[in-house]
Amino acid sequence: MQGKIKLCFLCTGNTCRSFMAERLMKKYLKKSNIDFVQVSSRGLEATGEMSTENACKALKTLGASGAKRKSVKLKKFDQKTLYIAMTSSIKAKVNGRVIEMKDLCGQEIFDPYGQDYETYLNCAKLIDSACKNLIEKLIKIGGEV
């Protein structure tokens, strides 16, 4: 293999969806002993705000790290990174290699920001399903790009 596959989950503010996707994906990479993938997450309009409490709680419920962190803004596109956009409107703003979450779980990932815990948990479960599908694809290719 030539190097690590770089994945970056993208949403608007990087406090909910892409943040949860990064943490869930890292959980599955560790569980599957996959070390040829580097995962990150960014927000197109991130401002350094802390991850939301309900996102952290939903992650813990699904067995991933719920530790808080500041959101990170995507400053430039890297042509060697595969971006995974939460929605088609986010995908339309990406200048690089990009797929949508609906390619992995059958639907766009709605923004739960400001909603109740159950809404966050339902969102996290959709993201979890997409991450499982992505892990299966990564296992099949064995890291070859």
Image: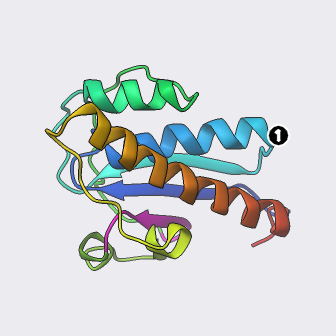
The spot of residue 40 in percent (x, y) is 49, 46
Q: Is residue 120 left or right of residue 39?
A: left
Q: Nearer the viewer, residue 74 or 50?
A: 50
The spot of residue 14 in percent (x, y) is 29, 44
- The reply to whether residue 100 is visible in this rendering is no
What residue do we see at 28% from left, 43% from top?
A: 119
Residue 20 on the magenta segment: no
Q: Quadrant of the C terminus?
A: bottom right
Residue 85 on the magenta segment: yes
What residue do we see at 42% from left, 44% from top?
A: 124
Q: Is residue 87 left or right of residue 21?
A: left
Whether 23 is drawn above or below 104: the answer is above
The spot of residue 116 in percent (x, y) is 20, 34
Q: Nearer the viewer, residue 2 or 47?
A: 47
Q: Amino acid at mark 1?
A: Asn
- The image quadrant that residue 115 belongs to is top left
**Residue pointed to by mark 1:** 33
Number of numbered labels in the structure image: 1
Q: Quadrant of the N terminus?
A: bottom right
- The reply to whether residue 130 is visible in this rendering is yes
Q: Nearer the viewer, residue 96 or 114?
A: 114
Whether 91 is drawn above or below 10: the answer is below
Q: Is residue 82 left or right of residue 46?
A: right
What residue do we see at 27% from left, 69% from top?
A: 90
Q: How is the image coloured?
A: rainbow
Residues rendered magenta in the picture? 79-87
The kind of secondary structure element at disc 1 is loop
Q: Is residue 116 left or right of residue 136?
A: left
